[in-house]
Amino acid sequence: MGYIFLSYSRKDRQIMDTLARKLQDAGFEIWLDTKGIRGGKAWRKEIVIAIEGAAALVVALSPHSAASSNVATELDLAKDANKAIIPLEIRTTAIPPEMKYQLTGLQRILLEPFEDGFAELVRSLAPFQIESAASTGGAGTTTKVSEKPRLTKPTAKRRKKVADKPAASASESKEVSSRKSGGLTRALIFERLANVIQQEMSGTKEDRVYLVTNIPKEKLISAMNAYASDASPADCLLLYDNTVFGGAKEGLLLTTTKVYWKNLVGPPHQVAYSDIQSITSQRGSFLEASKLSLNDEVFQLAIGDTDALAKALMNAIRAITTFYRETKP
């Protein structure tokens, strides 16, 4: 899908070098200013080219970056280029007015505790993860940008190192972190709700429904742009594509915090699970689609999709709502 542009203050260079290496180990291609070329026409040109060619921009929020006019400019460029912007708070930060417009509605990822924050960042970047070196255009724009500054690529050795890492250790670390903080971390909440979704949807075999890690990247991005702009890719549990040609601009998206939907006609809707008072499903017919009703707002499935699917979606939303009512994350 392309490389990830890291926007940061040079005063935070040490932590950003560490973060860049870990992202490379996780299989991401990273654009990072490693040679300090800031200033002058050459630098401005390189930054514009790099941001326009990036798949997404991660902005490292800290008191240093909040005071940086360069970081603010990079955010402006990313916004103008319609790039996905992922705010990563590496230190507690008050967002300055010149950055609020670009960051409004975007959920910040807290880097501390590091393991949980990094896991959440990786999930947020999953739609942009490269599958091979060819996915970034080979020796095209990426190579040109990498001349100044360096564009680093993950090596096969690094990928193998990550693949060989025991999965149990990550899970155990999350449990320990959860106990220390006195509640469930967002990573654990995601895991539990992912299990809930997979259980509730296990009996359905609809081509329009995509669960957790099987959600196509292009469809997810299209859905978020159309009716769930404040959602985070890291929190997405289920996508129901209600379009004829698979564009995913109408449909239903379940995240760990909200239900989003958009019908063919009408505005987009969203509701937090904590605000759901009622949810029902309505049986369809040969000429009429099945429906879901959330707080009396209707989502209409595609004609021909089964009533069983409508009931499964209803039960999935009910199960998540129940989880939050019975659990105090």
Image (cartoon, rainbow, N blue to C red):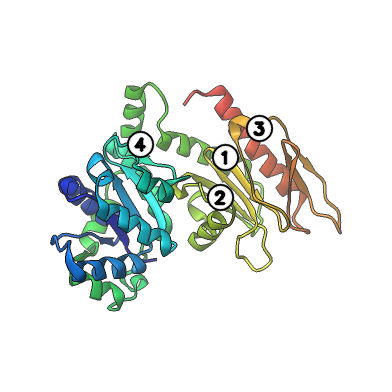
Residue at mark 4 to residue at mark 1: CA–CA distance: 25 Å
- Tell me which residue sits at (42%, 62%) in the image: 80
Is residue 50 found left or right of 190 in the rendered image? left
Amino acid residing under circle 3: Ile
Report if the CB atoms under discs 4 and 2 are less than 8 Å apart: no
Q: Earlier in the sequence, mark 2 or mark 1?
A: 2
Residue neighbourhood size for the residue with mark 3, other residues' Cα within 10 Å, grouped as few (<14), some (14–19), many (≥20): some
> From the viewer's perspective, is residue 185 above or below residue 252?
above
> From the viewer's perspective, is residue 140 above or below residue 220?
below
Q: Earlier in the sequence, mark 4 or mark 2?
A: 4
Q: Earlier in the sequence, mark 4 or mark 3?
A: 4
Amino acid residing under circle 1: Lys
Is residue 311 found left or right of 124 in the rendered image? right
Residue at mark 4 to residue at mark 3: CA–CA distance: 31 Å
Per the rendering, the mark at residue 276 is 3
Residue 65 location (% of width, % of height): 25, 46
Residue to which mark 4 is pinned:
171
- Tell me which residue sits at (40%, 45%) in the image: 100
Residue at mark 2 to residue at mark 1: CA–CA distance: 10 Å
The residue lying toward the viewer, choosing from 129 and 30, is 30
